[in-house]
């Protein structure tokens, strides 16, 4: 029964093809004014049916809320879910094509703090943008709420947030009372070993998962640590982010002096998919559970999209029964 209920909730979040309410409704609510993460007031006159997303995390949120079919443009880095891959690309990480965006005639653009200049240019052309800038898991929940309001998927947003919150609470309840020291490596450069300090999403996840971040006492979200500092901190667990151009585990354990680190001595080095811990979107809960599981020594998680197929063709009566 619990598995069925979870699947039911996740299906509603996705907004599967064939559901009668897959298109946004609620025109009587317009004009609508919302405040985005930059404090900007954005007024919408109609429900946005043609949406452009300039961040992979936002693309995932839109699909999770059942608005994937309304996304007409996104970025080269929007690689999940599968339906996002073949959508028209309007740019890369921070650079976007104003000409391409205008040609797609969007009703709304979901941008990030990296796109402020582009947002201003688009505003002059009469195209509205909502800037999203989540930096903690709590911010992600607020982002889901805001996006759900803008695209008239508030009920789905509430269900998604309820699922999120329940799983976050589960992680907190299982977190060890004595926090293990953790080093997270994202990249290697001439300045040192790139990690994640206060103000970063990874640091926020570690605090919830029950880890003590060895970079937590730095004064920047993305510090470069020396090998000497890392050895002296003696982390009990090491996480390596897979998508940030770092090195392999074999390279790490063979660094001079690193054999004295507890995580190396006891083999507690884990590679983590960067998309699950760096993207402030729906799959962040999977990343949190993976980190927490390794910290506890019992890694288990339920993938956000895993129950979709089981419930894809359920009729309304069956879904109500599952609840």
Image (cartoon, rainbow, N blue to C red):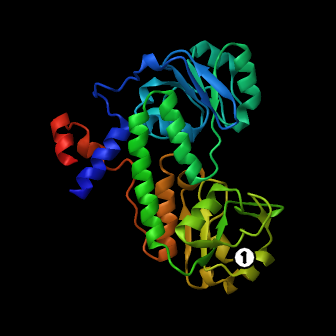
Residue 44 point in image, percent of width and height:
57, 19
Q: Is residue 196 visible?
A: yes
Compared across the picture, whether 15 is left or right of 93 comes to: left
The answer to whether 169 is drawn above or below residue 30 in the figure is below
Q: Is residue 178 above or below residue 246?
A: below
- Residue 315 visible, this angle: no
- In the displayed structure, 48 sits above or below 189; it is above
- Helix, strand or loop under label 1: loop
Q: Between residues 246 and 67, which one lies in front from this camera angle?
A: 67
Residue 263 x, y percent position in the rendering: 60, 80
Query: Could you say where residue 29 lies in the image, as x and y percent from the top left?
Result: 47, 20
Residue at (51, 58) in percent of width and height = 287
* Mark 1 residue crowding within 10 angstroms, few (<14) / some (14–19) / many (20+): few
User: Disc count in the image?
Assistant: 1
Could you say which quadrant of the image residue 165 lies in?
Answer: bottom left
**Residue at coordinates 59% horizontally, 48% vertically from top-left?**
139
Residue at x 75% of width, y 20% of height: 121
User: Is residue 132 positioned above or below 226 on the image?
Assistant: above
Q: Quadrant of residue 268?
A: bottom right
- Identify residue for label 1: 255
Q: Is residue 17 left or right of residue 111?
A: left
The structure residue drawn at horizontal position 32% and vertical position 34%, both measured from the top left corner, is 16
The quadrant in which the N terminus is found is: bottom left
Q: Residue furthest right?
A: 191
- Relative image position of residue 247 (x, y in whole percent): 66, 63
């Amino acid at each position: 029964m619990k598995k069925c209920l979870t699947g039911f909730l996740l299906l509603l979040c996705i907004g599967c093809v064939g559901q009668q309410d897959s298109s946004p409704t609620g025109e009587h609510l317009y004009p609508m004014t919302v405040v985005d993460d930059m404090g900007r007031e954005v007024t919408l006159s109609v429900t946005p049916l043609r949406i452009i997303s300039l961040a992979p995390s936002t693309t995932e949120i839109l699909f999770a809320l059942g608005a994937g079919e309304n996304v007409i443009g996104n970025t080269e880095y929007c690689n999940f879910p599968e339906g996002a891959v073949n959508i028209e690309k309007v740019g890369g990480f921070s650079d976007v094509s104003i000409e391409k965006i205008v040609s797609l005639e969007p009703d709304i653009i979901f941008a990030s703090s990296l796109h402020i200049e582009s947002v201003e240019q688009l505003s002059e052309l009469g195209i509205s943008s909502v800037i999203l800038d989540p930096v903690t898991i709590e911010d992600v929940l607020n982002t889901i709420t805001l996006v759900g309001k803008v695209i008239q998927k508030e009920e789905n947003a509430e269900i998604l947030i309820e699922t999120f919150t329940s799983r976050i609470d589960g992680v907190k309840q299982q977190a060890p009372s004595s926090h293990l020291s953790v080093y997270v490596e994202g990249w290697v450069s001439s300045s040192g070993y790139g990690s994640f300090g206060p103000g970063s999403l990874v640091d926020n996840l570690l605090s919830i998962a029950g880890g003590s971040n060895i970079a937590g006492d730095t004064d920047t979200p993305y510090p470069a640590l020396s090998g000497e500092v890392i050895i002296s901190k003696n982390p009990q667990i090491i996480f390596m982010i897979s998508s940030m151009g770092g090195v392999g585990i074999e390279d790490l354990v063979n660094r001079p002096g690193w054999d004295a680190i507890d995580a190396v001595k006891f083999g507690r080095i884990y590679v983590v998919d960067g998309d699950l811990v760096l993207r402030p979107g729906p799959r962040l809960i999977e990343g949190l559970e993976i980190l927490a599981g390794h910290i506890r020594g019992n890694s288990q998680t339920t993938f956000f999209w895993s129950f979709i197929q089981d419930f894809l063709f359920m009729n309304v009566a069956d879904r109500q029964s599952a609840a």
